[in-house]
Image: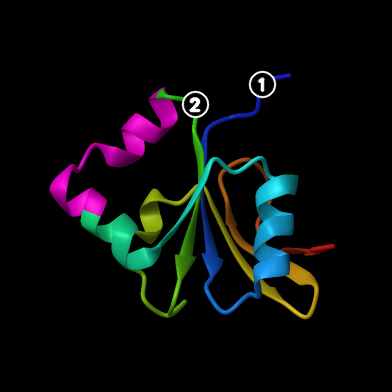
Amino acid sequence: MSLPAAIFFVNADINEGIRTTLMNQLFIDEALSDVDFDARVQVEPEYPSLIHLNGLRIMVLRQNFRDYTNRNLADVVMFVKQGLASIEKNNFGPPWINFPSR
């Protein structure tokens, strides 16, 4: 089974264990900061399309969830806190669902 390419936005204040768990469970190819992602999009506006064309799955760690810069480019936006992942945006299914992150 092939998973769809995706860009995940996750809050950056998660610990290393949660980050590793999410990367393993979601089959993430690369995790990068919001600054790096935004810079890549600024230099190459087609960067999100290249991610999808190459079948990649990336996780962008957002420092501030009130900053909506490039949020429209995310396929999934989730806020993780105390072992619970709240899905705020989901292009693959319904938003506003909560899941245990463990």
Residue 96 percent location from the top left of the image: 68, 64
Q: Residue at x 48, y 65 (%)?
A: 61
In-front residue for pair 84/95: 84
Amino acid found under the numbered disc labelled 2? Gly
The label on residue 55 is: 2
Marks 2 and 1 sit apart, C-alpha to C-alpha, by 9 Å
In-front residue for pair 22/8: 22
Q: Residue at x 66, y 40 (%)?
A: 27
Label 2 Cα crowd, 10 Å radius (few <14 / some 14-19 / many 20+): some
Q: Quadrant of the C terminus?
A: bottom right
Which region is colored magenta?
A: 40-53
Q: Is residue 60 left or right of residue 27?
A: left
Query: Label 1, on which residue?
Result: 2
Of mark 2 and mark 1, the one earlier in the sequence is 1
Q: Is residue 37 left or right of residue 16?
A: left
Q: Looking at the picture, does residue 101 appear above or below residue 7?
A: below
> Do the residues bearing badges 2 and 1 touch, measured as CB atoms within 8 Å?
yes
In terms of secondary structure, what is the magenta stretch mainly? helix
Looking at the rendered structure, the secondary structure element under dot 2 is: loop
Looking at the rendered structure, the secondary structure element under dot 1 is: loop
Q: Looking at the picture, does residue 5 appear above or below residue 84?
A: above
Question: Is residue 46 in the magenta section?
Answer: yes
Q: Residue at x 40, y 64 (%)?
A: 33
